[in-house]
Image (cartoon, grey):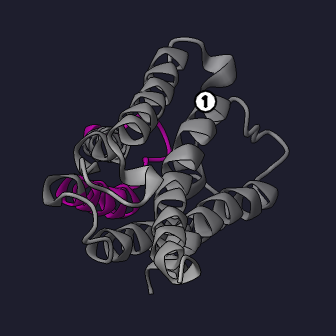
Amino acid sequence: MRLASAIAAPVALIGGWTIAAQLQPASYDPVTDTISALAGYGATDRLVMTGALVIVGVSHAVTASQIPEARTVGRCIYAVGAAATLAVAALPLPVEGTSPAHAMAATVAFGALGAWPLFAYRPDAKAWALRRRASIAAGGVLLGLVGAFAISQQVDHIVGLTERIAAGAQALWPLVVVISLRRSEREPQQGR
């Protein structure tokens, strides 16, 4: 179950933004325009990206519930990111302007999905991705990418690109954790 949910999140996110971008008018540019614009009220076929965000949020929630090897506080922060992703889908951008509720949901989602590895590690973890160094490195990279996205909002010509890099990395890290867990589960059997 956890492997399927960990795979579903990046596939739905990247597939969703790729398909939704193809449905937009030629004026949409994935380097300069955000993922949220694809699910906003002004988007063509906005339900494609909205549906993808729902799948991502549900997938993250399932994965968070299926990795008991991670510390509970890390899993809870991950689950907050999942819930905030669902809120992003439920609070689309208006046709014109911004939405404070959408911005808050996106901020919480990006923050939680970036920070959860910092709190998920276990000193005795068999899986390398849940060891202290790997978890701290992952959290640092993920939060650094979120910071780059935040800074890029002041430089409109790359905001879509930096958002996709940050969101894509956040969607992929749980898959890395699950694969690491699977490998660590097989190691004792191979030693027999």
Any magenta on residue 79?
yes
In-image side of 66 versus 143 (left or right)? left
Reading the image, the residue beneath label 1 is 162
Q: Residue at x 61, y 29 (%)?
A: 162
Name the quadrant containing residue 137: top left
- In the rendered structure, the answer to whether residue 182 lies left or right of residue 116 reads right
Count of labels shown? 1
Task: Return the residue nearer the eye: 45 or 7.
Answer: 7
Front residue of 185/155: it is 185
Q: Nearer the viewer, residue 78 or 179?
A: 179
Q: Position of residue 65 (x, y in %)?
A: 27, 75
Q: Magenta segment range?
A: 75-100
Residue 143 occupies quadrant: top left
Q: What's the magenta bit mostly, secondary-structure-wise?
A: helix
- In screen coordinates, is 25 left or right of 81? right
* Point 49% across, 48% down: residue: 170
Q: Is residue 133 magenta?
A: no
Q: Give left or right: position of 190 versus 120.
A: right
Q: Amino acid at mark 1?
A: Thr
Residue 24 position, x and y percent, is: 75, 54
- Dot 1 lies on which element? helix
State the quadrant of the N terminus.
Answer: bottom left
Residue drawn at (40%, 62%) of the image: 89
Vertical order, 54 against 40 (above or below): below
